[in-house]
Amino acid sequence: MANSVDYKFYSNISNTVIAERFNQFVKDMGYQIELSNADKSEEESLFRFYYKNEEMLSYHEENGYNTDLNGEGCFSLSSEAETLNEEFIVADTLDIETGFSQSVKFVFGKSYSYLLSVPDIIEEDPFSKKIFDGLYQIIQKEAGVSS
């Protein structure tokens, strides 16, 4: 069974807002949305699975993530609310011989992570790229950031 390719985004925009905008983008493409029963408090955690029709859903269940049906396939979006207070070493600055490294400290109040799972890498698959770009543009627009 084929695995998905996952892309992660972080934003200060509520996942209920992003999910609503992304759901409309997906519906405009003719896709259906399956909501997870695990969605308790949507602002804390959500999962959405997208498929075009029952044929695509059945094919996905048998074959995993793919774009075998007319260059399209199933995909999903999950999101978690979290507080980010972490330190990361910037990999490009790590020099084992000298012991030098640079770290970055991220301190945010409530933020949201978004995990987009698509059939293939966006550099090679136009469908996956379209889904990725759609979510990215929605997050940018809601955050007031232009590309």
Image (cartoon, rainbow, N blue to C red):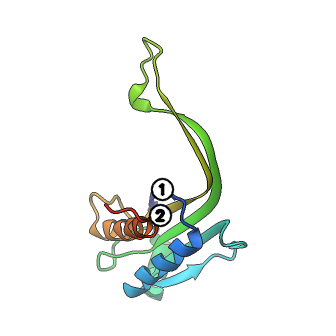
Point out the residue furthest to the right here.
40
Residue 20 vertical position relative to residue 127 in the rendered view, above or below: below
Point out the residue furthest to the top here.
98
- Judging by the rendered image, the residue that carries numbered circle 1 is 8
Secondary structure of the residue carrying tag 1 is strand
- Residue 95, labelled with which disc? none
The residue located at (56%, 81%) in the rendering is: 34
The residue located at (38%, 86%) in the rendering is: 28
Q: Position of residue 128 (x, y in %)?
A: 35, 67
Mark 2 Cα-neighbour bin, 10 Å: few <14, some 14–19, many ≥20: many
Q: What residue type is labelled 1?
A: Lys
Q: Position of residue 124 (x, y in %)?
A: 27, 59
- Judging by the rendered image, the residue that carries numbered circle 2 is 116
Residue 33 vertical position relative to residue 118 in the rendered view, above or below: below
Q: Where is residue 93 in the image (x, y as percent from the top left)?
A: 40, 26
Marks 1 & 2, CB-CB < 8 Å contact? yes
Left or right of 132 in this view: 19: right
The residue located at (52%, 82%) in the rendering is: 33
Of 11 and 80, nearer the camera is 11
Mark 1 Cα-neighbour bin, 10 Å: few <14, some 14–19, many ≥20: few
Q: Where is residue 84 in the image (x, y as percent from the top left)?
A: 61, 48
**Residue 121: quarter of image:** bottom left
Left or right of 19 in this view: 138: left
On the question of residue 30 being in view, the answer is no
Query: Quadrant location of the C terminus?
Result: bottom left
N-terminal of the pair, mark 1 or mark 2, is 1
Whole-Å distance between the Cαs marked 1 and 2? 6 Å
Residue 7 vertical position relative to residue 135 in the rendered view, above or below: above
